[in-house]
């Protein structure tokens, strides 16, 4: 079996594209070979800044012959149908077979395709891959029509077996495939011939090219650590930068330099970000001072002077960059020490969204909402409001203008310089979190209050203007915002009535939109008590059946306040408002399902818990779902579910047939069997345990008590015929089944559990 070696040699490929490109090359080529009838043992893809490489081992030398039968139209079908079938098969009428079936005779086409040599298939597949390669961006050059990420210079394509290495005959846009390549741009030895992958890798190494990106990463990291260790310092780990730098060099040579003393007073995040973004330098930290005092750059050449000239050039450019950063820092400090009023005014002219006002409007809403949330998370309301008003001011700073990724980080520095409390300053840094799945959540109460307010304001605002995520499109990162709220609440174990906070936020949006008309509107509405009461009921009804309201008094108070300010809204507007509110809560539930699914909780278990009161209390909901999930993994839990469903089915059928509801209480005196009496006793015991456990939110105890019903329910159905001929006994047993349903449904809606 031959081995295949492919190299596509070009000008420099952007580092950010290399990983996906090598995987695309591997998938597209191997999929094409398999589809054409070849098989292979293994395949590996590699990349350097100037080449994509694929090695395929154990490729079959030719494809197998294929015999394909296709059923066509009836012999009596119209001529047009027969002609269409002939065109699709490439056969003539006399080449078709006639076969009898139930409806008469039918045409069949038998197409036989002989096996093809591997070289022919490889050439065909590789040309198609090259011409349609999925680069994020590509270009044309010269007079040709081929598009590639950068000008493609040569193609190496070899099939090697025991008879030797053979060039696959292939020409793409004037580029003829061969068996030669070249090494390092400056330290290489010109073009050279290769006979297979092993020979290719060895000769590339001699020509100063490390083919494997993982090997280049390891060499860079080890070299950087050795240099830092020798100087008594340590390299700041940055896996993303390491991967990027490995995609910039074919022969990595780490070099270490020092940062000039005049820049050492800059915040370490500024130094690290500036060096990473502008120079692709690794930061080197002094473990004794905690300061960033040096850098490691990676050259692509072994210099005769040991890299001294390279380092001098890099330090000169770095000094210019850090001079800019120093200027930004000093200018921003001047504004911060003056109270940041300049930035407050500046945000008034910055539009957050043309339908949601300016950044200053948004900050007002977040501050008011953070004040409402603060007591629920153990934060001081004044501190939370103050933190919210300061948290986004660094967006107007020169430093964040240059390095947007430092938003929040710089806000903390500026707040401290302005004399703010540490907790307030920390909120400026932390309220953006979590930014992604791998990001941790803040735990300080003030930071949590502002982070929740920020994300809830974003969600309610974009929901109000119908800018919701659709399919894979989420331009305003609303899924991430909802998941952020979920992680903030669950990660800190807070009990938060999400529905009320969404209403709070909606109120703030309406207040901003109707501020000018509020005084006259409030005076008018206060005179009409009857309309006010109708409004409150309308609010409760229009939340929808899927929203389980567990705090009606608080909801009534909220509705009173909303009516006093926005009662002038039409009925259609109110219905739309509360439909959006219900839809937004459902969106949170969908995000929660995704979050819990990753933790092993099934979607139907979550649905069973969502149907219970308190489904806007995320912590309560997860505790219930987790406890139910654990119970259903046990034998008792799984069997209890079957017993419950049997009881529910029998009861539902009887109620539908009789037109009555059997829920008036079963009486022990009508029990005829020991199994019935045992079930009565078991239900009494379960209720006595479940009721206080549910009130105490001790779901584990409640679920265990429910699972203990498994044995008496099984025994009951084994020994007792529910639909007895004695109607009194039958009604009593149906009422007993209702008790089973009621006891279990007090824990979760088990009808929603699958299986």
Image (cartoon, rainbow, N blue to C red):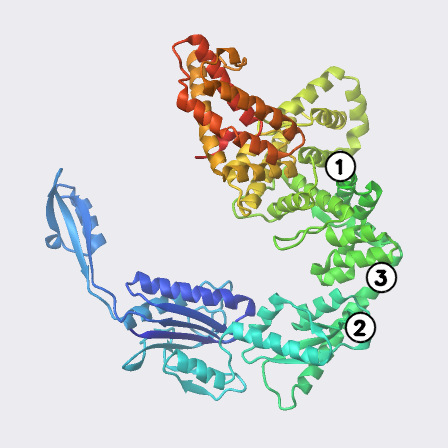
Q: Is residue 34 above or below residue 157?
A: above
Q: Residue at x 65, y 54 (%)?
A: 439
Is residue 15 visible from the viewing direction of this image?
yes
Q: Quadrant of residue 573?
A: top right
Dot placed on the residue nearer the N-terminal end, 1 or 2: 2
Q: Which mark is residue 512?
A: 1
Judging depth in this view, the residue of 178 and 26 nearest the camera is 26
Residue occupied by mark 2: 263
Give the left or right position of residue 268, taking residue 178 as reference. right
Q: Residue 556 in the image: state x and y as whole percent.
A: 72, 24
- Cβ–Cβ under 8 Å for marks 1 and 3: no
Q: Is residue 580 visible?
A: no
Picture quarter containing residue 743? Answer: top right
Tell me which numbered mark, 3 or 2, is placed earlier along the sequence.
2
Q: Position of residue 435 (x, y in %)?
A: 65, 53
* Separation (CA) of disc 1 from disc 2: 45 Å
Q: Nearer the viewer, mark 1 or mark 2?
A: 2
Label at residue 493: none
Which residue was labeled with disc 3? 333
């Amino acid at each position: 079996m031959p081995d295949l070696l492919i190299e596509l040699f070009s000008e420099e490929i952007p580092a950010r594209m290399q990983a996906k490109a090598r995987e695309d090359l591997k998938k597209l080529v191997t999929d094409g070979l398999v589809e054409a009838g070849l098989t292979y043992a293994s395949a590996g893809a590699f990349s350097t800044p100037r080449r994509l490489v694929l090695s395929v081992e154990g490729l079959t030398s030719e494809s197998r012959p294929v015999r394909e039968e296709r059923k066509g139209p009836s012999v009596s079908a119209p001529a047009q149908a027969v002609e269409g079938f002939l065109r699709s098969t490439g056969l003539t009428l006399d080449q078709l077979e006639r076969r009898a079936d139930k409806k008469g005779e039918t045409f069949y086409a038998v197409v036989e395709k002989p096996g093809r040599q591997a070289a022919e298939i490889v050439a065909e597949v590789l040309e198609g891959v090259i011409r349609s390669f999925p680069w994020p961006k590509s270009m044309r050059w010269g007079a040709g029509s081929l598009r590639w990420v950068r000008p493609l210079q040569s193609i190496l394509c070899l099939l090697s077996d025991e008879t030797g290495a053979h060039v696959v005959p292939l020409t793409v846009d004037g580029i003829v495939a061969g068996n030669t390549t070249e090494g390092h741009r400056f330290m290489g030895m010109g073009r050279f011939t290769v006979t297979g992958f092993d020979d290719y890798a060895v000769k590339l190494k001699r020509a100063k090219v490390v083919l494997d990106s993982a090997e280049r990463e390891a060499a860079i990291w080890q070299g950087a650590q050795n240099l830092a260790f020798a100087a008594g310092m340590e390299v700041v780990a940055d896996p993303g930068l390491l991967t990027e730098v490995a995609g910039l060099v074919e022969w990595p040579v780490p070099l270490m330099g020092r940062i000039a003393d005049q820049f050492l007073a800059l915040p370490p995040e500024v130094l690290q970000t500036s060096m990473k973004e502008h120079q692709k330098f690794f930061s080197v930290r002094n473990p004794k001072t905690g300061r960033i005092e040096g850098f490691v750059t990676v050259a692509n050449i072994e210099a005769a002077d040991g890299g001294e000239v390279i380092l001098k050039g890099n330090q000169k450019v770095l000094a210019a960059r850090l001079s800019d950063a120093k200027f930004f820092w000093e200018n921003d400090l001047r504004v911060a020490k003056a109270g940041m009023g300049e930035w407050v005014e500046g945000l008034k002219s910055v539009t957050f969204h043309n339908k949601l006002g300016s950044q200053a409007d948004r900050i007002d809403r977040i501050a008011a909402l953070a004040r409402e949330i603060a007591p629920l998370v153990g934060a001081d309301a004044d501190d939370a409001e103050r933190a919210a008003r300061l948290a986004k001011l660094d967006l107007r700073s020169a430093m964040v203008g240059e390095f947007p990724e430092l938003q929040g980080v710089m806000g903390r520095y500026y707040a401290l310089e302005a004399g703010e409390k540490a907790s307030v300053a920390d909120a400026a840094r932390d309220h953006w979190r979590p930014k992604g799945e791998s990001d941790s959540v803040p735990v300080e109460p003030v930071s949590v209050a502002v982070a929740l307010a920020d994300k809830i304001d974003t969600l309610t605002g974009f929901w109000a203007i119908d800018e919701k995520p659709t399919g894979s499109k989420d331009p305003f990162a609303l899924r991430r915002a909802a998941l952020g709220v979920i992680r903030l609440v669950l990660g800190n174990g807070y009990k938060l009535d999400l529905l009320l906070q969404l209403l709070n936020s909606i109120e703030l949006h309406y207040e901003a939109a109707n501020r000018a008309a509020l005084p006259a509107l409030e005076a008018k509405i206060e005179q009409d008590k009857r309309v006010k009461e109708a409004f409150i009921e309308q609010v409760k009804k229009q939340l929808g059946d899927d929203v389980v309201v567990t705090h009606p008094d608080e909801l009534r108070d909220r509705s009173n306040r909303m009516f006093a300010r926005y009662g002038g809204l039409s009925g259609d507007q109110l219905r739309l408002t509360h439909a959006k509110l219900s839809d937004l809560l459902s969106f949170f539930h969908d995000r929660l399902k995704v979050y819990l699914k990753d933790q092993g909780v099934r979607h139907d278990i979550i649905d069973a818990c969502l149907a219970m009161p308190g489904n806007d209390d995320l912590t309560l909901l997860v505790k219930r779902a987790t406890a139910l999930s654990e119970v259903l993994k046990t034998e008792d839990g799984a069997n209890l579910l079957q017993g419950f469903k049997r009881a529910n089915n029998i009861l539902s059928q009887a109620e539908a047939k009789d037109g009555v509801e059997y829920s008036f209480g079963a009486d022990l005196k009508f029990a005829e069997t020991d199994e019935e009496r045992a079930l009565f006793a078991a239900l009494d015991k379960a209720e006595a345990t479940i009721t206080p456990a549910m009130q105490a939110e001790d779901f584990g105890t409640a679920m265990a008590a429910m699972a203990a019903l498994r044995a008496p329910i099984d025994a009951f159905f084994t020994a007792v015929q529910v639909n007895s001929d004695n109607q009194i006994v039958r009604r009593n047993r149906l009422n007993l089944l209702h008790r089973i349903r009621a006891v279990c449904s007090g824990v979760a809606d088990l009808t929603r559990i699958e299986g």
